[in-house]
Image (spheres, rainbow, N blue to C red):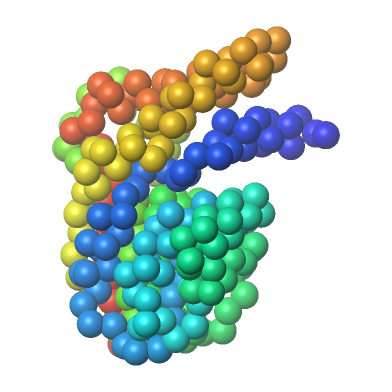
Amino acid sequence: MTDEARLFEIFLDIQRGLPRQGPGCAEATREALALCGELPDGLTVLDVGCGPGMQTMTLAETLDAALGRPIAALDMHGEYLTQLQASSAARGLGERIAPLQGDMAALPFADGSFDLIWSEGAAYIMGFAEAFAAWRPLLRAGGCVAVTELTWLVAEPPEEAARFFAEEYPAMTDVATNLASLQAAGYEVLGHFTLPDAAWWTDYYSPLEAKLPALRARYAEDAAARDFVAASQREIEMRRRYPDSYGYVFFVGRKTD
């Protein structure tokens, strides 16, 4: 195993089994869906970078009979899709979700395939503006897109938080810039809102933090792995210190002509 592959396996080990791979909650998913307004019957939906798919299942439950076919739930990592399959089957949603392993930058769909494209906490992999532009051709006329993005909520972030994210996510910007990117990519802005602080903790940071002591013990003799675990703890502490300075923001838009 190469060093890169080993480090990635450590990352997966830290994240393995968590309900979510990033901040989110069912209430926020439903609120963003409501911003899309009336959606057509026979609805076609793509969830990009779905992870374990808690939001996918919320979409499947909320949209229910409106779906024309199962939600296409795409992720690069097969083990997240396996987790989604098990969870959706347990909730009686297996027939409404179609997991698919693939690369969000090379989606295997024809133009005009979807009425709704969804992505919670994953668009940053391509870049916020780049994702909106790349996915637009896949939408039918009047189709909607809904994406969460890590965003500064204040004009002058605290110095410690600014240094942290300059290393962890240097592309992070503010709400106004992200709204402008959405419009520049060819969308009408339907709305935006910041996820509640509980969306960071209930299904993500709290279960992640509970894992860290066992991970420190497991990797006690592995310096690189210990660094990964320490970085996770530092990220959690940053959130505790500066919850009002940054957040995940839902951006919802409709494809323009």
Residue 247, above or below 104 = above
Pick out the residue farthest to the top.
Answer: 221
* Residue visible at 35% across and 21% down in the picture: 237
In the image: residue 18, left or right of residue 242: right
Where on the picture, by quarter, is residue 56? Answer: bottom left
Can you give x and y, in whole percent of width and height, for residue 137 in the image? 46, 80
In the image: residue 119, left or right of residue 213: left
* Residue visible at 19% across and 54% down in the picture: 193
Q: In this orientation, which residue lies closer to the viewer: 125 or 122? A: 122
In the image: residue 147, left or right of residue 247: right
Residue 163, above or below 73 = above
* Residue visible at 46% across and 30% down in the picture: 208
Look at the image and tell me in which quarter the N terminus lies: top right
Can you give x and y, in whole percent of width and height, for residue 110 in the image? 56, 84
Q: In this orientation, which residue lies closer to the viewer: 197 or 224? A: 197
* Residue visible at 27% across and 62% down in the picture: 30
Look at the image and tell me in which quarter the C terminus lies: bottom left
Does residue 37 appear anywhere in the picture?
yes
Q: In this orientation, which residue lies closer to the viewer: 175 or 87? A: 87
Can you give x and y, in whole percent of width and height, for residue 130 in the image? 44, 61
Does residue 48 appear anywhere in the picture?
no
Can you give x and y, in whole percent of width and height, for residue 249 in the image? 27, 50
Pick out the residue farthest to the right.
Answer: 1
